[in-house]
Image (cartoon, rainbow, N blue to C red):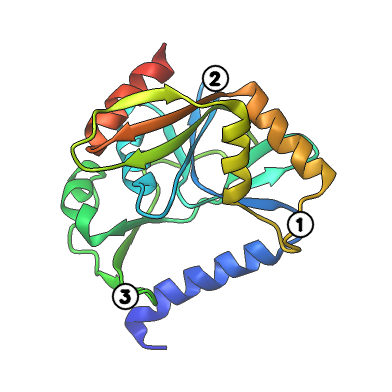
């Protein structure tokens, strides 16, 4: 591949290897570490997981990973894959100053046509497994009031299954039980928002309470 595309291609290859490993089920989402458990941010592509996770990392929580979370079905716990932050062009000006990184990092072309920059995680997170304190599903729309709305556990579990990937394409009984246990033990919300700063302030306040 072209030199400029080597980084995105390598990251893609690493993710493919992880997804093919039968040891764990992978969940597409960002994981934050707090003193009272993990916080899982989920949502459709473009929901702002990376931007919100990086913004929250400046408010006292630790960003363990912003792209992929692994499920340990035996212990109903999760751990993030600590890949570098993927920052898209539209978020770069805002986040480069907040994360105190080199603003001259090159923009690299991905296969989907997006130009991205890869930034090391703001702080080293411990590579350990976490119970979840909260599962937050992101819904970002223009001119939307920022609010946390409780999410029914059944709906949260259904969405979590939609975000999960197993190498076989099937869910084992242990996986179903583990995901249900995670949802049962966590607060479940939908976060409606437009601006990442407002959403981060509201969520940080909730996590501090």
- Which residue position holds label 3? 113
The quadrant holding residue 204 is top left
**Marks 1 and 2, how far apart in space?**
32 Å
Please report contact status of discs 3 and 2: CB closer than 8 Å, yes or no. no
Q: Label 1, on which residue?
A: 170
Q: Earlier in the sequence, mark 1 or mark 2?
A: 2
Q: Can you name the residue that lies furthest to the bottom here?
A: 1
Lower sequence index among marks 3 and 2: 2
Quarter of the picture holding the C terminus: top left
Front in this rendered view, residue 55 or 136: 136
Q: CA distance from mark 3 to mark 2?
A: 39 Å
| Local secondary structure at mark 1 | loop
Report which quarter residue 147 is drawn in.
top left
- The residue that mark 2 highlights is 36
Q: Residue at x 59, y 49 (%)?
A: 162
Q: Quadrant of the image for the N terminus? A: bottom left
Q: Find residue 38 and report its horizontal and vertical position in percent.
A: 54, 30
Depth order, front residue of 42/96: 42
Residue 23 percent coordinates (x, y): 77, 55
Q: Is residue 47 left or right of residue 169?
A: left
Vertical comparison of 120 with 152: above or below: below
Q: Nearer the viewer, mark 1 or mark 3?
A: 1
Q: Is residue 127 visible?
A: no
């Amino acid at each position: 591949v072209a030199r400029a595309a080597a980084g995105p291609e390598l990251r893609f290859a690493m993710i493919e290897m992880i997804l093919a490993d039968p040891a764990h089920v992978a969940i597409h989402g960002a994981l934050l570490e707090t003193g009272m458990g993990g916080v899982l941010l989920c949502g459709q592509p473009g929901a702002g997981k990376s931007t919100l996770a990086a913004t929250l990392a400046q408010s006292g929580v630790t960003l363990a990973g912003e792209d992929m979370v692994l499920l340990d079905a035996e212990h109903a716990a999760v751990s993030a894959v600590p890949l570098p932050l993927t920052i898209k062009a539209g978020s770069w000006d805002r986040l480069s100053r907040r994360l105190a990184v080199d603003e001259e990092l090159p923009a690299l072309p991905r296969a989907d046509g997006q130009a991205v920059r890869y930034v090391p995680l703001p702080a080293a997170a411990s590579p350990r497994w976490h119970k979840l304190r909260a599962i937050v599903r992101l819904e970002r729309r223009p001119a939307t009031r920022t609010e946390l709305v409780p999410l029914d556990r059944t709906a949260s579990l259904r969405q979590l299954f939609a975000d999960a990937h197993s190498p076989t394409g099937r869910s084992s009984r242990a996986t179903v039980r583990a995901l249900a246990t995670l949802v049962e033990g966590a607060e479940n919300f939908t976060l409606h928002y437009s601006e990442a700063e407002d959403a981060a302030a509201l969520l940080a306040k909730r996590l501090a309470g």
